[in-house]
Image: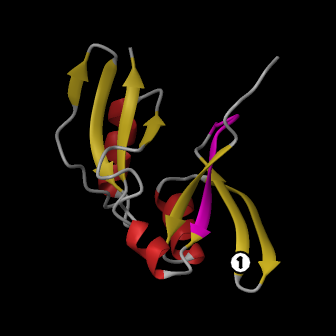
């Protein structure tokens, strides 16, 4: 048997703003953008070179969903962007205006630094050892 994680939902305030951030600044691929009617869309983006997991961007539609934007994981790092060249991607992201919460650090599992997307979600940029 084989299973894989296909997508993780990320609640965002606006589809197009989220698409612009992930595709223009992080070079993610827009895998799907399907109009479902009634203002709802199926929008999926994935990191460059990704073969499996992606983000399903879901526009917040009520007060509870709006309140969860940027805090879907209770303030913890909830997303992990793996890279094959930490320092290249760290520099590229900084040049694109992405702010890191810390300087890169070496952990037993690799090099890592925490950053936030414009919606407040905490991410790790990580290169495993």
The residue furthest left is 103
What residue is pinned by disc 1? 40
- Residue 51: in magenta span: yes
- The percent position of residue 105, horizontal first and vertical second, equals 20, 28
Q: Quadrant of the N terminus?
A: top right
Q: Secondary structure at mark 1?
A: strand
Does 17 lie within the magenta span?
no
Locate the C terminus by quadrant.
Answer: top left
Asked if residue 28 is positioned above or below residue 65 in the image, the reply reads above
Residue at x-position 53% and y-position 75%: 60
Q: Residue at x 75, y 86 (%)?
A: 38
Q: Residue at x 32, y 33 (%)?
A: 87
Q: What is the span of residues highlighted in magenta in the rendered image?
A: 49-58
Residue drawn at x 47%, y 26% as measured from the top left: 84
Residue 74 in percent (x, y) is at: 33, 52
* Picture quadrant of residue 39: bottom right
For this orientation, the residue located farthest to the bottom is: 38
Q: Is residue 29 left or right of residue 72?
A: right
Residue toward you, 65 or 44:
65
Q: Is 67 displayed left or right of 61 in the figure? A: left
Q: Is residue 111 left or right of residue 73?
A: left
Q: Quadrant of residue 124?
A: top left
**Apparent side of residue 121 relative to residue 84 in the rendered image (left or right):** left
Q: Count neighbours of disc 1 (C-alpha within 10 A) and say few if under 14, some if 14 to 19, many if 20 or more.
A: some
Q: Residue 117: x, y in percent? A: 38, 59
Q: In terms of depth relative to the viewer, which is nearer, 72 or 92?
A: 72
Q: Quadrant of residue 16?
A: bottom right
Depicted 65 relative to depicted 8: above or below: below
């Amino acid at each position: 048997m084989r299973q894989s994680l296909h997508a993780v939902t990320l609640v965002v305030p606006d589809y197009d703003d989220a698409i612009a951030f992930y595709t223009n600044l992080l070079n993610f691929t827009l895998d799907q953008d399907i109009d479902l009617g009634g203002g709802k869309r199926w929008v999926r983006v994935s990191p460059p070179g990704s073969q499996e997991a992606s983000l399903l961007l879901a526009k917040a539609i009520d007060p509870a969903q709006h309140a969860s934007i940027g805090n879907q994981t209770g303030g913890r790092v909830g997303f992990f962007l793996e890279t094959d060249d930490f320092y290249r991607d760290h520099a590229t992201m900084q040049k694109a205006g992405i702010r890191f919460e810390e300087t890169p650090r070496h952990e037993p599992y690799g090099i890592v630094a925490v950053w936030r997307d414009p919606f407040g979600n905490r991410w790790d940029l990580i290169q495993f050892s």
